[in-house]
């Protein structure tokens, strides 16, 4: 009996890999078939059969995994726990999700997420530990808002780092804490300091240098000097910046050495630091150069001014016998000037000579000028006319010098009275300059000056100035802001033009001011010139402000911190 030979089996789709089967399923068997499967009506069933067989194979092929090593227990947080009301408040703040109402209308409800920075600042000031159950939500909030991270990680404490090592979404906590939670070496731990400085990551070394500089400035400087020659230029620049903390004349020899650095940015930073030391040799060299450019001359007549020269303002009319400041800008930038930090090439739109003059005057000690200009005080110097249209350039350089040298007398003179026309003062040529000059004054002086500015000029240009004032705002400043907002409401415009100031008021007004807002909560009668519905929007804005202030007062009581939040937002 003759047997009929069995034909060889057709190739099967089961030889295809799982990835190939997934690709075929996504594209369809009309466009692609796996290896070993013929196109046609049966292709779809063959793919499903192959997928079923591959699933069984994949499951059967798994080997039991070793049991994961149990993580080490979370470290203890020795700080006292939050009071129960404060813990409930934290949960409420973390549960809030920011959103924008239709049409930009915020309504009267407080923005709880904007209160979280204040709450964290106060909790940190009181030394409380974060509730363990709140840590995931706290880390999620900090993940989405980088401005929250420093305060949130400080409040979260060592347990946040423990959690961050277990969840990749929270790895920012390890990056935000140099060394991933490594405690900087303390006093007397010299061996660990040297080892971390020699072997640590860049962030760890920056943190180490900053920590050491705060408690031992000389030790930090010596540590930096020990490896200075072998550091990269960008690292030298970052390390040099740490010397701003507790800068003294003892740092001068090291900074003088840095003036010869091969990096222009390092040289410029070293020169800036030296010019902040009025008794330094660099400051004396810059003063010697500057006094050759600026002098007092009683014989000057009013020189003609090119009306097309926009870089200079026009000098006022004066008699030939009136004293005036004469300016002769440098004609070249020599090698010595460049070594001392003068940048030779000006930015676009600036003339070379005015650019060099500004740098010389900015770096010269302000104590140079009374003796040079007839024994006059800063206010009298700034009142002098300046020849040839150099007034703006000269006064702007004195502004920068006052900020760099933290000279309050010059800053007051340059600011001028807040009631002056445009509140420009003799030399404050921009809001940014005024804000920087305010930073040299005491908190009380700042608040009084800005209150006077707002009372005279309103809120349209006050936002940047308000940011320089201590929180909570002093009563005169708070009253000036509320009164200006009331005036803006009576003018009939929408409150959105003042949303930035209103947001600052919610965070910075003293909560005790809430009672003063009660008379502003009703919808006012609208005049014919008022924008439609503006009164209702203002009533909501004032209601939200009053509610926020009372909520801040309640938060402070829950944390046992008195009636106000003293930390800046």
Image: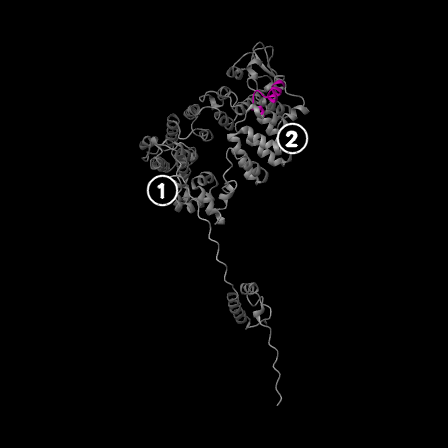
Asked if residue 103 can be seen in this view, the reply is: yes
Circle 1 residue: 87
- 312 or 344: which is nearer to us? 344
Q: Is residue 283 magenta?
A: yes
Q: SS class of the residue under badge 2?
A: loop
- 63 or 554: which is nearer to us? 63
Residue 11 screen position, x and y as percent: 60, 73
Q: Specify how the rendered protein is coloured.
A: one colour
| Magenta range | 274-288
Looking at the image, do the residues carrying marks 1 and 2 touch, with CB atoms under 8 Å apart? no
Q: Is residue 66 magenta?
A: no
Q: SS class of the residue under badge 1?
A: helix
In the picture provided, is 468 more to the left or to the right than 347?
A: left
Quadrant showing the C terminus: top left
* Residue 41 vertical position relative to residue 225 in the rendered view, above or below: below
Classify residue 357 by image quadrant: top right
Q: 10 Å neighbourhood of mark 1: few (<14), some, or many (≥20)?
A: some
Circle 2 residue: 261
Asked if residue 105 can be seen in this view, the reply is: no
Decide whether the magenta segment is chiefly helix, strand or loop. helix
Spot the residue most to the top: 321
Residue 168 screen position, x and y as percent: 50, 49
- 1 or 199: which is nearer to us? 199
- Give the mark count: 2
Quadrant showing the N terminus: bottom right
Residue 141 screen position, x and y as percent: 44, 44
Spot the residue most to the bottom: 1
In the picture provided, is 174 more to the left or to the right than 267?
A: left
**Alpha carbons under labels 1 and 2: distance apart:** 53 Å
In the picture provided, is 411 more to the left or to the right than 516?
A: right
């Amino acid at each position: 009996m003759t047997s009929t030979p069995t034909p060889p089996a057709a190739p099967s789709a089961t030889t295809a890999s799982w990835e190939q089967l997934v690709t075929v399923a996504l594209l369809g068997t009309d466009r692609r078939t796996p290896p070993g499967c013929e196109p046609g009506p049966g292709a779809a069933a063959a793919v499903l059969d192959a997928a079923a067989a591959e699933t069984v194979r994949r499951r059967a092929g798994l080997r039991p995994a070793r049991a994961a090593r149990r993580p080490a227990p979370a470290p203890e947080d020795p700080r006292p726990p939050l009071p129960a009301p404060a813990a409930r408040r934290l949960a409420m703040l973390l549960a809030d999700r920011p959103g924008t109402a239709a049409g930009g209308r915020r309504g009267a409800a407080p923005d709880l997420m904007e209160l979280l920075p204040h709450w964290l600042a106060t909790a940190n000031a009181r030394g409380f530990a974060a509730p363990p159950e709140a840590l995931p939500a706290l880390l999620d909030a900090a993940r989405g808002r980088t401005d929250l991270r420093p305060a949130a990680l400080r409040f979260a404490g060592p347990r946040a780092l423990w959690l961050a090592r277990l969840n990749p979404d929270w790895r920012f906590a390890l990056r935000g804490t140099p060394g991933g939670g490594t405690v900087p070496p303390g006093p007397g731990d010299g061996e660990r300091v040297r080892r971390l400085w020699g072997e640590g990551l860049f962030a760890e070394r920056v943190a180490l240098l900053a920590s050491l500089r705060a408690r031992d400035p000389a030790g930090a400087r010596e540590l930096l000097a020990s490896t200075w020659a072998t550091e990269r230029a960008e690292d030298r620049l970052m390390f040099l910046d740490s010397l701003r903390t507790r800068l003294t004349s003892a740092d001068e020899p090291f900074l003088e050495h840095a003036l010869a650095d091969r990096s222009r940015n390092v040289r410029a930073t070293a020169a800036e630091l030296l010019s902040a030391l009025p008794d330094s040799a660099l400051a004396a060299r810059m003063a010697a150069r500057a006094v050759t450019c600026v002098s007092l001359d009683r014989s000057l007549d009013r020189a003609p001014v090119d009306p097309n020269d926009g870089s200079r303002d026009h000098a006022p009319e004066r008699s030939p016998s009136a004293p005036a400041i004469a300016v002769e800008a440098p004609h070249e930038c020599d090698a010595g000037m460049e070594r001392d930090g003068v940048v030779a090439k000006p930015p676009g739109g600036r003339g070379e000579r005015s650019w060099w003059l500004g740098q010389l005057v900015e770096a010269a000690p302000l104590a140079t000028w009374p003796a040079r200009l007839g024994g006059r005080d800063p206010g009298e110097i700034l009142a002098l006319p300046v020849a040839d249209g150099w007034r703006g350039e000269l006064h702007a350089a004195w502004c920068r010098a006052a900020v760099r040298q933290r000279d309050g007398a010059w800053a007051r003179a340059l600011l001028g009275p807040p009631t002056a026309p445009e509140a420009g003062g003799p030399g404050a040529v921009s809001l940014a300059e005024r804000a920087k000059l305010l930073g040299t004054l005491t908190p009380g002086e700042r608040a009084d000056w800005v209150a006077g500015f707002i009372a005279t000029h309103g809120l349209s240009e006050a936002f940047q100035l308000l940011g320089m004032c201590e929180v909570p705002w002093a009563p005169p400043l708070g009253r000036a802001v509320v009164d200006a907002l009331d005036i803006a409401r009576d003018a009939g415009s929408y409150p959105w033009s003042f949303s930035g100031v209103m947001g600052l008021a919610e965070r910075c007004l003293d909560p005790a001011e809430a009672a003063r807002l009660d008379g502003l909560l009703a919808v006012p009668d609208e005049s014919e010139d008022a924008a439609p519905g503006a009164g209702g929007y203002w009533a909501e804005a004032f209601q939200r402000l009053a509610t926020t202030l009372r909520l801040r007062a309640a938060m402070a009581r829950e944390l046992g911190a008195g009636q106000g939040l003293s930390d800046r937002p």
